[in-house]
Image: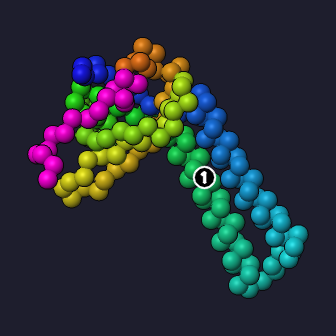
Amino acid sequence: MRTAPSIQIEAELRGGWWLAAGGLWLLAAAAWAGALVWHIRLEGLPETGAGLLLWSVVCLGGLAALSAAGTAMWHARRHPVRLCWNGSEWRCTLPGQAEVDDGLPGQVDTVIDVGDAMLLCWASEPGGDAPRRRVWLPVARSTQGPAWHGLRVALAQPIAMTEGPLT
């Protein structure tokens, strides 16, 4: 069996993936705001004491979570992740790694495949003291151009065993 050609792609939050992420953020914001309004109508707004403190923590916690999610979406859009297949292994260069770095070795799984778009999950190789990293990579045919076919072939390629025989 022939090996898939070497490829390099950049996974960025663009197009439909950006709309889907934005839609999920809006859904979460609407659910949080709806729960607050429902609680106010049902029990009213607490005036003093522990109830007011708890209410403030819930409001500020929700705003902090939505702000963090929005910041993560902005960061994913501005700083793409580079994924490379060299014919024998996957390597991923994460935002903040040096440009000369070849990236970390790992494995890629296809989580969602709808033909013109895929959601991939890259997981670093276990080993050493470093924790295992997992990165979700939205990719679309419209953003990958000629690398799209090579990516699909590489994802279908069985990974050769590099360890000893099975016992």
Q: Position of residue 38 (x, y in %)?
A: 83, 66
Q: Position of residue 80 (x, y in %)?
A: 43, 33
Residue for point 60% across, 52% down: 67
Question: Which residue type carries mark 1?
Answer: Ser
Q: Is residue 1 left or right of residue 65?
A: left
Dominant secondary-structure state across the stretch colored magenta = loop
Relative height, residue 127 to residue 43 (above, below): above
Q: Is residue 93 left or right of residue 118?
A: left
**Between residues 11 and 5, which one lies in front from this camera angle?**
5
The reply to whether the magenta stretch includes residue 153 is: yes
Q: Which residue is most to the right?
A: 41
Q: Which residue is most to the bottom?
A: 49
Relative height, residue 34 to residue 106 (above, below): below
Residue 161 found in image quarter: top left
Residue for point 41% across, 18% down: 149
Q: Is residue 73 left or right of residue 42?
A: left
Q: Position of residue 85 (x, y in %)?
A: 29, 28
Residue for point 59% across, 34% down: 18
Q: Residues within 10 Å of mark 1 (few under 14, many from 20)?
A: few
Label 1 belongs to which residue? Answer: 67
Q: Position of residue 29 (x, y in %)?
A: 71, 53
The reply to whether the magenta stretch includes residue 7 is: no
User: Which span of residues is magenta-colored?
Assistant: 151-167
Relative height, residue 6 to residue 35 (above, below): above
Whether residue 98 can be seen here:
no
Q: Secondary structure under badge 1?
A: helix
Whether residue 146 can be seen here:
yes
**Between residues 77 and 124, which one lies in front from this camera angle?**
124
Residue for point 77% across, 64% down: 35
